[in-house]
Amino acid sequence: LKVLFVGINPGLVSAARGHHFAGPTNHFWPCLSASGLVDKVVTYNDDVNLPQRYRLGITNLTMRTSRKASDLTLAEQRAGIPALNAKFRQYRPRVACFVGKGIYEIYAGEKCKQMGVQGKRIPWDNQKGSTRLFVMPSTSGIVSAYQKPDKI
């Protein structure tokens, strides 16, 4: 994979629709469409085609559905780290893009000082590369600190 996007967990709408970032106020799909990583407008219905068509993937740190991320305990979220690391080793994305500063901080166990490329890398099992970590603003419509152009 080129990029593996990492979300916190499925929201209620995403779980009901069976697709990532499927909530009507989530900016993920409009931002991805405008990013240059894809060559057309994509929606949550396209999530299953991303790996083959664009070498992009999506996963979550925690698989339990909730109304909002704050419904999850810190321990519950941290429990997903080993499985996420296994995905980095298995799929060997060049970049793991954490969709939100908070999820990166849980994963890394430290404050995120700036958006963008982080100093830490995750080595692949084959010793032929590593996954670079990247942090972008949350695409949730609930998060108002960043507007859509800041998320592209």
Image: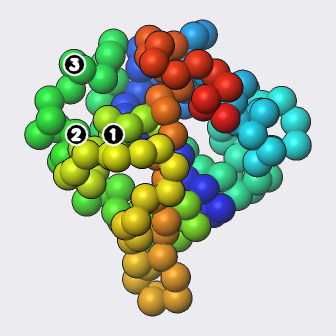
* 70 up-or-down from 120: above or below: above
N-term-proximal mark, 3 vs 2: 3
Q: Amino acid at mark 2?
A: Gln
- Nearer to us in this view, 60 or 37: 37
Total residue callouts: 3
Q: Is residue 66 visible?
A: yes
Q: Amino acid at mark 3?
A: Asp
N-term-proximal mark, 3 vs 1: 3
In the rendered image, which residue does mark 1 sit on?
103
The local secondary structure at tag 3 comes to helix
Give the percent coordinates (x, y) of residue 47.
66, 37
Quarter of the figure with residue 76: top left
Q: Is residue 44 visible?
A: no
* 83 up-or-down from 46: above or below: below
Q: Nearer the viewer, mark 3 or mark 1?
A: 1
Q: Amino acid at mark 1?
A: Ile
The local secondary structure at tag 1 comes to helix
Colouring used for the render: rainbow
* 82 up-or-down from 50: above or below: below
Quadrant holding the C terminus: top right
* 120 up-or-down from 51: above or below: below
In the rendered image, which residue does mark 3 sit on?
71
Give the percent coordinates (x, y) of residue 20.
54, 31
In the rendered image, which residue does mark 2 sit on?
77
